[in-house]
Amino acid sequence: MRRSSVALSDKVAFLKHRNSYPSRSRRIEAVETHFAWVFLTPRLAYKLKKPLRLGKMDYRSLAARKRGCQEELRLNRRLAPSVYLSLEQLSIGPRGQLRFGASGRIVEHLIKMRRLPRAAMLDQVLRRKRVTRAQLERVARRLVQFYAIAPPQPMAARDYLARLRRSVYANREALRRLAPGIAARLVEGVAQGELVLINHIQDELARRCERLVEGHGDLRAEHVCLTPPVSIIDCLEFDPQLRRLDPAQDVALLGLEIARLGNAALAQWFLEAFFGATGDDISEAALQFYMSLTAMTRAKLAAWHIGDPQFPDARPWIRRTQRCLREAQRHARRSLRSLGSSGSRDSGWPMLEQFRQRQAAQRSRQRLAEQRGDGQHRELGGR
């Protein structure tokens, strides 16, 4: 009998069965996220988007899910070309059975990926205290290369400042609504501090609006695979405005994660490597503001899970919300302190400031050497 539609539960049941796959996999591991199911074979992964709508993300129709899969492939091949393999289909066979391929009536689209080793993901390596500076330097270099060729998407200064303020308001309002009993005074205090910061550093932020690119949008440690070459997966595909970012803000999330899962010194070193390679002279106040704003956004995302029936135990999400709020407060305070330290860049990130001082001294020596000739250049270079 011809089926007019196939329920999500039927698709999930089919994809959980090892005999459903062309390779007749020995085992299948199914992982459910808020917006998708991921089915893991020993070598491959298949991602199925749920037919959901949330804000600008609307995957309720088959055509929308196809477009979303195609966009996810395009975007993630920028930082993980060997991971994102192809668009696959589920179809209905002549006897009404589900099967892989497009030879029948297509009822679903999937993203086929190469499975990455879990032990090599940055979050796991950080938790085991095994990450090295060389590994983080490779991640920083990969990101520097990515932003260097990312499509520029500059914005008018007035629009960029308004957008940053809207982000502060949106985070505050969402946290008021989703987690009204969780550190309400902290939410208000951080939001007010961020608005003050925007006013104080608006000239620098207005200049940085020229740096906006189509970035990643979700640079979490669990999305970074350290096996060479470094692969970075799972960018935000459903809203291009969430990817329209200053690279410094995009990288801020990864800095926060390294600090949380590793230690603050590693995060400082990673940011030092990244900004040193880009030549970006972002002030400490602006960097810490970006990190505070990013932490508040992560608090909002964690709060979305509180009260969600898919997650009956709200306690982990409450703790995560509180932790992100404390991170936002810490970085807002560092930014504000840097503004009150006679124009210096805050001692909260001394390694970054020391690196900048070394770079400035090196440039000064190079300019002096060029004036004195090649012989003097070699002499100074040996100092």
Image: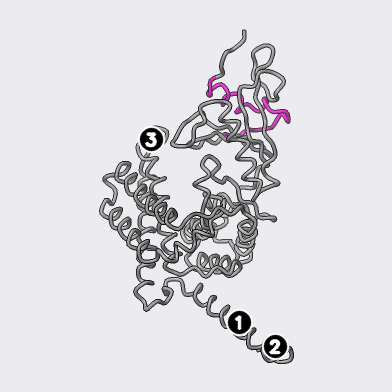
Residue where numbered disc 3 is placed = 308
- Number of other residues with Cα within 10 Å of mark 1, as a class: few under 14, some 14 to 19, many 20 or more: some
Single out the mark in the foreground, 3 or 2.
2
Lower sequence index among marks 3 and 1: 3
Looking at marks 2 and 1 on the same chain, the residue that comes earlier in the sequence is marked by 1
Q: Name the residue type under label 3.
A: Asp
> What is the secondary structure assignment of the residue under circle 1?
helix
Disc marking residue 362: 1
Please provide the residue range marked out in magenta. Answer: 7-30
What is the x, y in percent for residue 80? 66, 48
Residue 265 is one of the magenta-drawn residues: no
Where residue 157 sits: x, y (%)?
A: 45, 58
**Left or right: 357, with 165 as reference point:** right
Label 3 crowd bin: few (<14), some (14–19), many (20+), radius 10 Å: few
Relative to residue 216, is residue 286 drawn left or right?
left
Q: CA distance from mark 3 to mark 1?
A: 54 Å
Q: Quadrant of the N terminus?
A: top right
Query: Secondary structure under badge 3?
Result: loop
Residue 160 or residue 38, whichever sits in front: 160
Residues packed near mark 2 inside 10 Å, few (<14), some (14 to 19) or many (20 plus)? some
What residue would you read off at disc 2? 377
